[in-house]
Image (cartoon, rainbow, N blue to C red):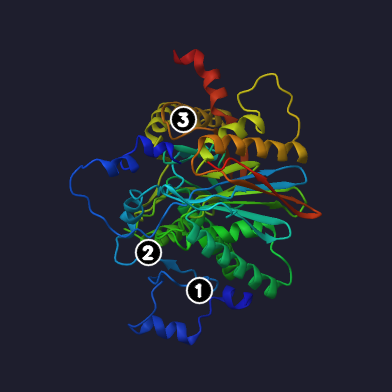
Amino acid sequence: MISSHSFGDNGKMKDYHYTGPVEHRFSPYAFNGGTVLAVAGEDFAIVASDTRLSEGYSIHSRDSPKCYKLTDTTVIGCSGFHGDCLTLTKIIDARLKMYKHSNNKSMTSGAIAAMLSTILYGRRFFPYYVYNIIGGLDEEGKGAVYSFDPVGSYQRDTYKAGGSASAMLQPLLDNQIGFKNMEGVQHVPLTKDKAVQLVKDVFISAAERDVYTGDALRICVITKEGINEQTIALRKD
Amino acid sequence: MALFDVSGFKPYSELRGQILPAGQTHLVDRTNHYAFGTKTQEFAVPLGVDPSGFLKSCNRDGGVCIELNHGTTTLAFKFRHGVIVAVDSRASAGRYLASNDVNKVIEINPYLLGTMSGSAADCQYWERLLAKECRLYRLRNNHRISVAAASKLLSNMMLGYRGMGLSMGSMICGWDKEGPGLYYVDDNGTRLSGRMFSTGCGNSYAYGVVDSGYREDMTVEEAYELGRRGIAHATHRDAYSGGVVNMYHMQEDGWIKVCKEDVSELIHRYRKGMF
């Protein structure tokens, strides 16, 4: 969330002003940007992310999507520090395999969410700098979205945005999907096509105003038929 | 294996490790471990740094901003007909509102409830662990755990990690052989039994409201209204509390969920008496 830094104590502005001796020390974390979004519908779920990987003023890659497929019915979106995202997804994959081998079935979305919560809490004192959102179908075939904080607190939602542009996207989703702050509007349930179009519009807006979001948009649509992936171009500047 | 875990039987190697001084500690301070923590839970710790100040120190470097979900007002009080538990539903991460509909009451079992305030992850994790321990107790001893014992288990868990930066203020409410029980447990290991508690950053506002309206012989409807008012007024004045009021009533035969009401609507209803 960049907004909290422009007025905050130590943003990039300070680098160009001499304010006295500053202690420099190794930081185990870096911020690699990126935005993730997930929406749950009646019988589908959508997980979308941009594909820009940045650090400071540079762009490392324009083709680094942040959605990772876990099972046939679950996709996770991870943004924050790319190193921790990679390690975390490796650990989740290993745990999924272990579960498959000892229980002879795939983990359900709710079970993956509960497991991720304990994995993240195991690093309570040295957290994974990752904002996770899981999207998938629950046991009844309904869409489910689970959102996490870096140390494992989680809850089930209908829609959630995470990552650098989350503070810009979440109010827009509250209005369009949650019908907040609107009067006299019919609460129409969200169809899959309308949801995909909304996600595209929302990311186009995010790319306009957030420097860390852009390049391309990867959308994963999860239905009982499987996971369908599409890539749409966004602003590259 | 399941029976192995439930019976509490410890293999010889584990016991030996505990008796002899070179035993394993729970804190694994290698940061590159891939142990997965499936058999026993392990906690990674940053090397050479005080864990409680570590996260704050990382927040200064180029763009890194790790904010954990926080904040709340919760209250609970005992009266003639049981225990009322009322909580708000806001979770904030720094200045950003992460969620406005978090459930801050953990249903441990049909006779035990735990509330959450402070760091959301700490409360969720340790109270879920408490639920597991209460279930194991029931299976091993063939009777339900008492509220005093459950709160003591939680307080000992907190004492094990005292000084490491955990943040949790919880109330354990239940009904056991001694009648209705209410205990306050926090991250310092404090454990207090009492008639009324309120925790979180909005607690002073809630105390004011509940203290002025409390009577031991209230009717059930009056008690519900008091709990609702306490949370509604606290959310009105405290920036870090808000959302909806989730209210539970602990009765002799278990708890019931009373209501889930939006605080803005409650404040509109009370407005006549306020200004």
Name the residue nearer the viewer: B187 or B180: B187
In space, the residues marked 2 and 3 are separated at their CA atoms by 33 Å
Q: Amino acid at mark 3?
A: Thr
Look at 66% across and 41% down and name the residue there: A158
What secondary structure is marked by label 2? Answer: helix
Judge from the rendering whether residue B204 lies leftward or rightward of residue A49; answer left or right.
Answer: left
Callout 2: 10 Å neighbours few (<14), some, many (20+)?
Answer: few
Residue where numbered disc 3 is placed: B235
Residue B87: percent from left, percent from top: 51, 38
Residue A63: percent from left, percent from top: 59, 54
Residue where numbered disc 2 is placed: B160
Residue where numbered disc 1 is placed: B35
Name the residue nearer the viewer: B10 or A203: A203
Chain letter, disc 2 residue: B
Look at 73% across and 60% down and name the residue there: A72
Residue B183 visible in rendering: no
Residue A217: percent from left, percent from top: 63, 46
The answer to which of marks 2 and 3 sits earlier in the sequence is 2
In space, the residues marked 1 and 2 are separated at their CA atoms by 22 Å
Chain letter, disc 3 residue: B
Residue A102 visible in rendering: yes
Name the residue nearer the viewer: A157 or A90: A90
Q: Amino acid at mark 1?
A: Ala
Is the Cβ of the residue at disc 3 closer than 8 Å to that at disc 1?
A: no
The answer to which of marks 1 and 2 sits earlier in the sequence is 1
